[in-house]
Amino acid sequence: MTIIDRPPAPRPTAHDGGVGLLEAIRRHPLLTFFLLANGLSWLAWLPYILSLNGLGVWGVEFPAMLGTSQLLGVLPGAYLGPIGSALLVTAIVDGRAGLRSWAERLLRWNVNWRWYAVTLLAVPAAALLAGLVFSGGEVLAPSATVLVAYLPLLLLQMVTTGLAEEPGWRDFALSRMQRTMGPLRSALVLGPLWGLWHLPLFLTDWGGWPDATWTRPVVFLVFCFAFNIVMSWVFNRTGESLPMSMLMHAGTNTFASSLGAEMFPSLDPEASLLSMTVAAVIASIVLVLATRGRLGFRALTPPRLGPVRSRAALSSRP
């Protein structure tokens, strides 16, 4: 399946210096983003993968911070990849105006309060239901310690996972892909690419190495494929609010690593991931059918005649 970045640009002339690296990036911003996001992250993760936290080839262990080695081993590569690549490509392709628009979506907190409820509560509710089914109804009440720590953990996930990934995958890639490929096709393509970016981490303790079975990354890819459809719907329905995407992503990780792990002790990490994947697949099918594949997307196209209207005027159309 081919990803069309944008309509073909006019042929460069001798005056503009021909087709160089910058011109190639401007012609293919999406391809450039995906190559950079994967390449930069995987390169930065290589020491972590080779360390004692991974394959054990390099006899160094990354120290734990806040109870995990991932802050030092995973986070630098995560920042360097999606958000770093999106920032670089946006600056080259769209200049200062594009960077301002990108930053504006990053600060778009002013959405209807219902979407805060959806992003913060929908995933825990679905995960609880799936956990009840997969555990056979064996559930424990969460401890006071986990309940008190939930909000700080959520905020930490917002500035780590949410900020590192969502400005790239949703704000940069999804918003551009939908303009040429449509919402459903974009979601179906972006989901596997998002999952692929994570795959080297399954060779580290992030992915349960060396105890995880080969099925865990496969199930994880299915989860990314399905959950990306849900994330696309939220992104579109909130007017491309990046904070809402970050909240849903961070809330999913926070619930799975804290409340979910404590409430369903009979579920090992692979069973827990499988339960959340089944919930994500069901939710994605419901959304595709309910929205007829539009996933809340509303194309903003200028009128054929008359003066060009503003984005706000276009978004007010029925």
Image (cartoon, grey):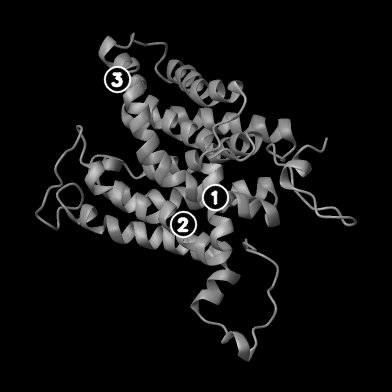
Of the pair 174 and 100, the residue shown nearer to us:
100
Q: CA distance from mark 1 to mark 2?
A: 9 Å
Of the pair 51 and 92, the residue shown nearer to us:
92
Label 1 Cα neighbours within 10 Å, binned few <14 / some 14-19 / many ≥20: many
Left or right: where 18 falls relative to 154: right
Circle number at residue 87: 2
Q: Locate residue 271: give its quadrant.
A: top left
Residue positioned 14% across, 58% down in the render: 57
Q: CA distance from mark 3 to mark 1?
A: 32 Å
First in sequence, mark 2 or 3: give its number. 2
Q: Amino acid at mark 1?
A: Trp
| 3 or 1: mark nearer the eye | 1
Q: Where is residue 80 shown, x and y percent of the image?
A: 36, 55
Task: Please tell me whether residue 81 is drawn above or below residue 278 in the rendered image.
Answer: below
Circle number at residue 121: none
Q: Are marks 1 and 2 in contact (CB under 8 Å)?
A: yes
Task: Please tell me whether residue 288 is drawn above or below residue 34 in the rendered image.
Answer: above
Residue positioned 52% across, 60% down in the render: 90
